[in-house]
Image: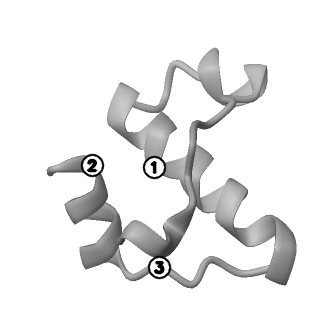
Amino acid sequence: MSNLNLKGIWIPIEILTDNKLSDKEKIIYTIIIYLSKENKYCYLTNKSISELLNI
């Protein structure tokens, strides 16, 4: 997990104001978008994301 180089995330307003998503879903969605910008896909597994967020 330390090789992620994740220093912070920016949550787009469309996600932040979406009342259909919980706060955790907003964070997970934002991480997936951030990680998929370079390669057009998210390379983290569900397990890795849950470990990153302690859920």
Q: Which residue is mark 3?
A: 44
Asked whether the residues under the numbered discs 1 and 2 touch, taking CB atoms below 8 Å apart as contact, a structural biologist would say: yes
Tell me the distance, in whole angstroms, between the alpha carbons under discs 1 and 2.
9 Å
- The dot on residue 13 is none
Horizontally, is 14 left or right of 8 in the view? right
Type of amino acid at the residue the image marks with label 2: Leu
Name of the residue lying farthest toward the left? 55
Identify the element where label 1 is drawn: helix
Colouring method of the image: one colour
Q: Is residue 23 depicted above or below 1 in this figure?
A: above
Other residues around mark 1 within 10 Å, as few (<14) / some (14–19) / many (≥20): some
Tell me the distance, in whole angstroms, between the alpha carbons under discs 2 and 3.
12 Å
Q: Which residue is mark 2?
A: 53
Q: Which residue is mark 1?
A: 28
Mark 1 / mark 2, whichever is N-terminal: 1
Residue 49: x and y, percent?
A: 34, 64
